[in-house]
Image: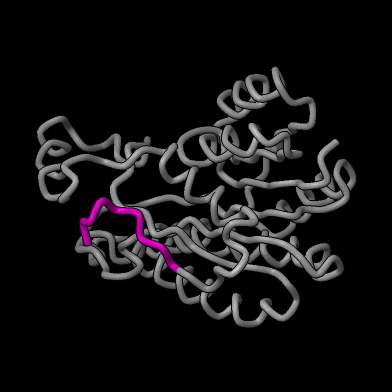
Amino acid sequence: MSKITVLITGSSRGIGRAAAEEFNKNGFNIILNCSKSVDELDETVTHLKETNPNVIGIVADVSDFESALDMFRTANTRFGGVDILINNAGIAHMGLFSEMSPAEWQRVMDVNINSTLNCTKLALPYMLERKSGCIVNISSVWGLTGASCEAVYSLTKGAINAFTKALAKELAPSGIRVNAVACGVIDTVMNSTLDAAEKASLAESIPMGRFGTSLEIADLVCFLCSNKAEYITGQVIAADGGWI
């Protein structure tokens, strides 16, 4: 059994699943998570188990602290602790802020911010004890620049970027690195609401002329967690094809 355990939230599909597949190539213990896409989570776990028996899936709404706590109890019982945490769980909301209800903006904040806070809080005791660990937060370029009709989403990703930089300074003396990947337009379910014409127009606005792929983000995440990135912490790295 590998000594390295990685937990990826929101990993039944998209970037989370792609990251799991990349980590799986190195034989890590892998903990996958989702809150709703249970069938997809089960399929992903089954797929990874074909080459690695040390893969488990846990259904938990990590925006709720008690639910996240139960997940970590299971993870710690099975593998001892989490060495690498990928905070990938997130949702978007498109529309005018003036038309959002408090319940709608609270949900975006709960999933995008509280999930990251909850899982980071629960992963840290093991990392601090071992004086090593790596945390990667999946963010967005809208956290850097803001986006019209995605005001609250932009707010949450800006918060994640600031949290990344602050926490990296706090944890660096303990040998724990914290970074974020600020994604541009990635070809995932999150952008499935766009029709073909809208996707084509959006791609034209990106200097590289296309959307990014989940695998490209996964490769960057894995690099940030590798020994090749041992001196990189507190960074918010944009992966956007030159868009912003």
Q: Residue at x 47, y 50 (%)?
A: 220
Residue 193 locus on image (x, y percent)? 26, 37
Q: Image height check: is 20 above or below 3? A: above
Q: Residue at x 77, y 47 (%)?
A: 4
Q: Which percent across, then down, holds residue 226?
A: 62, 53
Q: Is residue 64 left or right of residue 144?
A: right
Placement of the C terminus among the 4 image quadrants: bottom left
**Relative image position of residue 36 (x, y in whole percent):** 56, 36
Which residue shows up at 77% across the image and 53% down it? 82
Vertical relation: 134 (above or below) 77: below
| Residue sitting farthest toward the top | 50
Question: Residue at (70%, 17%) from the top-left corner?
Answer: 50
68, 99: nearer the viewer: 68
* Residue 63 appears left or right of 185: right
In the rendered image, residue 185 lying in the magenta stretch gets the answer no
Instruction: Classify 173 as above or below 62.
Output: below
Residue 148 versus residue 189 in the image, above or below: below
The residues colored magenta run 236-244
Of residues 14 and 18, which is closer to you in this image? 18
Along the line of sight, which residue is nearer the eye, 198 or 173?
173
Colour mode of the rendering? one colour
How far from the left and from the top, in percent, is residue 96? 21, 60
> The N terminus is located in which quarter?
top right
